Image (cartoon, rainbow, N blue to C red):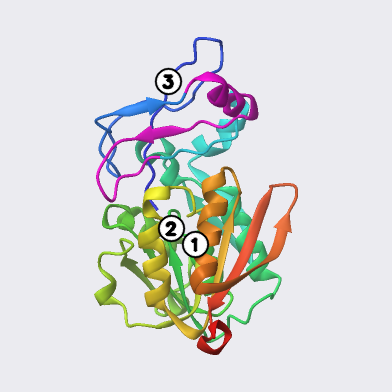
Amino acid sequence: MCRAFCGSWNVLGFFFFFLLRRHPLTQVPSQISLRFGRDMQKKLDKGFLHLSEQRGAGGMALVPYEETTELGLQKFHKPLATFSFANHTIQIRQDWRHLGVAAVVWDAAIVLSTYLEMGAVELRGRSAVELGAGTGLVGIVAALLGAHVTITDRKVALEFLKSNVQANLPPHIQSKTVVKELTWGQNLGSFSPGEFDLILGADIIYLEETFTDLLQTLEHLCSNHSVILLACRIRYERDNNFLAMLERQFTVRRVHYDPEKDVHIYEAQKRNQKEDL
């Protein structure tokens, strides 16, 4: 999913490595507020940068970030990120300079891809969709493991996403893989209700304004037999709030935790009506 990309220098010597610029994925926000005071200082101490953008529906506002040294940023500036999954070498093109945080590989995508490779869920011959795919790593891995995958993001991200899919999937697998526009809560009519066996999302729980649209999208795409897998870090209380919202419509359980990367994977399925009686 597209994320706004902004930054500034902290006068106390903390370096914010996000440069305020206009880029194709989002417009430069008209208003940006940094939450200072003790709360902000705690976030800085933990290496989190929180930007709040006052915009209408569909705006991107939150940039969670944990790398506080220039060395930590170097992996995002590399034009290619290389991985080995499903007996394939995968080279993901990154474009930090022009597309910002939407066009780099985040830890949640790596952890979810590893979880899929472990065989935790059956993929061969099943239909899967990746939401807010960004670079497309998770969808690419799912396709290599045998799923028929629809890899989605907002329209402005699709050309970049397609380039990674085409570069990393053999032709016979590309024919079973679709890159398609999906803006949460908006163009759901182009997807059949309950269309997918598996719904995948890596680091898509970060912007509170999108929670309702994301839940609506999950509800639309899921059948009673669909499985949702969401990989994320729990950075703020609102992340837990989303999980609580999710539990009102789905049964939710944590199925995996990577302590090194501090990434959780949650599995969710639609609640059986009889369970709610």
Earlier along the polypeptide chain: callout 1 or callout 2?
2
Determine the residue positioned at 59% across, 75% down.
145
Q: Residue at x 51, y 69 (%)?
A: 248
Residue at the far front in the pictured view: 277
Callout count: 3
Question: Percent x, y for residue 64?
Answer: 51, 39
Q: Find residue 8 and name its label.
A: 3
- Say which quarter of the image contains residue 20: top left
User: Is residue 99 placed above or below 28 in the rendered structure?
Assistant: below
Give the Cα separation between the discs numbered 3 and 1: 33 Å
Q: Identify the magenta region.
A: 36-61
Per the image, is 236 magenta? no
Q: Residue under circle 1?
A: 245
Q: Position of residue 230 (x, y in %)?
A: 56, 63
Q: Which residue is mark 2?
A: 164
Q: Which mark is residue 145?
A: none
Q: Earlier in the sequence, mark 3 or mark 1?
A: 3
- Image point 56% across, 45% down: which residue? 237
Label 3's element?
A: loop
Snapshot quadrant of residue 96? top left
Asked if marks 1 and 2 touch (Cβ < 8 Å), the reply is no
Q: What is the residue that sits farthest to the right in this orientation? A: 259
